Amino acid sequence: MTSRSPRDGADRSDRAATADSEGRRAGSRGARRGEPAESDGEAVALRSRLSTLGTVLVALAVLCSVLGAGPIGPAAAALAGGDATASDGAVPSAGDEVAPAIETGETAAPGGAVSREIDGSFSRPTYTGTAGDPVEIRHVVDTSGGDTAYLLVGGNRLTDSGGTVGFVDVLKVGDGSTTINTRLLGTNESGVKSCSADRVNCSLEFKNEDGDVVADSLANLSGVGSTGAGGLARPLVPERYRLAITNGTFIVRDSGAIDPVEVAAESDLVLEEPGFHDEAEVFTTADSDVIADGGDDGEGTESLAALREAGLDRTAVTKGDRVVLGFEATGIWGAMAHFAERRSGESDDGTAIEAGTTLNHTVLVDLLEAEEGVSLTVRQTNPGRNEPRAELDLADADSDDVSLFLAEESELERGDADRNGVPGRFYLAIDTSDGGAFTHDVEPGDEFAVEFALEGTDGERYRFDDGGGEPPAAFGAQSATDEDVAEQYPYHGTGDGRVSAEASFSVRERYLRYDHVTDDGTVLVETGDGTITGTTTILPVAELSATIVRDTNETPSRTESELAIEDGNFSADSGLADVAPGTRASYRLYRGQSLQDSREVLVVDNATDPRRLRLANGTTTNLTVTRGESLAALSATVRNVGQLRDRERLTLDVDDGEIVEERYVTVAPQAETNETFGGFDADLEPGEYPYSLAIDGDRVNGTLIVEADPAVTRVDETDGNSSESTDGGEGSGDGDDGAGDGDDADDSTGNGSADEGPNESGPEGDDGETPTEEPDGTPATLLPFGIGTRETFGGTVLVGATYLLGHWV
């Protein structure tokens, strides 16, 4: 293949000639001028010709002076074969010859034009960023003289593998800086002035190592063994890419590396792996109408800081407030910048997004709808039977219902990568009011699951759609055409799977709950404090105030105070401190100028226990009654020591359930009542019994003494082998223990047994008992000699035994 002459008229393949060769040519001409003449005629002719030649040379010198031609400058340094060690430290291999020196000074071009050397520099030797995010390359370029400066990206040989980076692009640049969107570079949406785009007019020349021109554009560069921008298989992967400021002429090495012929400055762009934080942040904040970050512009523009200040770190969002969902990842910001710039009509240079800014939520919608392997779902988890499930619908949401905030990442480690002002987190603030961003209105009690994910399938990888040699479509993934393969995140490898960040939140009603109220809703405050307290789901920024009015003998007393809300609790000064218990006042709650609540306030001694019933002095603690007698003398004095009319249950318990009585007692504030138990009899065996009286947690213990009735004798019926006994000695004539015969108190019979010895009342004797009534009131049957039928039978047996045996058994 023959070489093409460069635009400046010089054969660039012959520009390997050095200043030394020019000196040799000059010496040769001097030697020829000093040769002796073979004859005088010849000498004369020679002098004549020389004079004519001198005149011509003088004329040419004058002409050159007029045209401004100057001397050719010194030669530039030679470039190493392959990727020069200046960028990656690689040593040229045996097959990579060192390129001849290139003249970089001013040279004459056809028509007398002059091409000047490109000057430039980078602000740092290495730029680091994250693959998929924008990276700003700061440089200085001197393009005086009308020359065009180009920025070579890639084309370098890798030091670790010896192979090439597999990508090369040439950008048309000016002075200042160039922001490279690494997600778009090499595609038809690169955003910078890439020479691969038809709309960018570049003058490039690629030669092989023999000096032959092999390509004059990036479009046909891939045909000579190097991967140009038109042959990009996927977005720029994490790797090192050489940066060089040059004039647009390059050498294509046999290894595939691309070397600029003239280099004004060199640097490197190192892209690192994107990161993903697998936890989502959730907090709640007030409606946008309530809060705003009133900045210097006076427009009240919201900010993420304002959302946090007006919110609470909780996952329960009050109906009508906003839930804020935060997600953290790198590698998605180049795509998001593209959609943001497309929405705004700006160029795709990645500058439309930066940490601390707010975007329209439709930018996120575009990202989610692109074939980018990024997904976000917010859906209800507890719909009722036959009820539709509420889900977040960003595409149909109004901008008043959803806001998108950008912030720096806080959990991810970037390594050596520069932030470059690129955000690492985004937050969605979603309104929960009716008619908002959900497919159905959310209601208190609804629960939602949140998931932000980067899709990936084992064995699959994102791949650009085949563009037919042209730069591929930035968001036309070929995997999306396969129904069996889901969308793939561009920076997942074949071994990477799906990753996600999950969270949840719930919706609850808007309310204030007072700590101390009566059954009718009266708010209680304690004397000495006078503070109204409670809990609330309302956020602190709400403008709530209370007005308390107390009527006095002279003029009404009015107190107005703001409700202080903190951590879900609220308080307000009622102005009733040190007011006597029982004092009442009216209470009204306002939100701004809108009345929210109206009720009564009562001052009490103890707001926790304002309606206390207590057993006062006068309550019986000891009582003695005769068996069977009424308990009318047992009484309980119940006093209400609180400030509210109260009704509680009064309980009497004798001997752990022997006698139980329960009744409800109602007592007015600061009053007392007396309760008696006349309807109950002491139907207990003679003895002492503990009892208790209890009401409203207060208890009084006492002792009930039951005595035997002296008018009653109890006669128990026994079998024929046992003697008769009396019950507890009721009605006995002899003996302190009530026994009819004998002194043994433990004997249950009226007469002594055979083991007890002689009967002290006489052998047949009369035991001295007087006739008694049975307990049921029926008179006992009497025999002529004063003992009953049963006693007669028992006595007969006993006497017979005594007579026959002759002694007492």
Image (cartoon, rainbow, N blue to C red):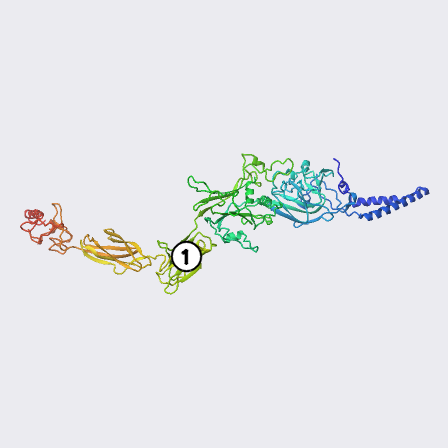
Seen as rendered, the residue at the extreme right is 40
Describe residue 574's horizontal placement relative to residue 620 as left or right.
right
**Which amino acid is tagged 1?**
Arg
Can you give x and y, in whole percent of width and height, for residue 590 in the image?
Answer: 44, 55
Above or below, 313 against 383 in this view is below
Q: Position of residue 291 (x, y in %)?
A: 50, 53
Instruction: Please state if 671 lies on the left or on the right of 187 as rendered.
Output: left
Which residue is the extreme one toward the bottom? 554
Q: Nearer the viewer, residue 392 or 312?
A: 392
Residue 81 percent across, percent down from the top left: 70, 41
Q: Nearer the viewer, residue 650 or 443?
A: 443
Image quadrant holding the N terminus, namely top right
Say left or right for 357 vs 390: right
Residue 156 in sight here: no
- Secondary structure under tag 1 reads strand
Expressed as whole percent of the image width and height from the top left, the position of residue 796 reads: 7, 47
Q: How many marks?
A: 1
Q: Quadrant of residue 193?
A: top right
Q: Which residue is mark 1?
A: 588
| Apparent side of residue 696 relative to residue 403 in the rendered image (left or right) | left
Q: Is residue 558 visible?
A: yes
374 or 124, nearer to the observer: 374
Q: Is residue 57 above or below residue 545?
A: above
Which of the 4 quarters of the picture holds residue 618?
bottom left
Label 1: how many residues lie within 10 Å, few (<14), some (14-19) or many (20+)?
some
Asked whether 140 or 429 is in front, the reply is 429
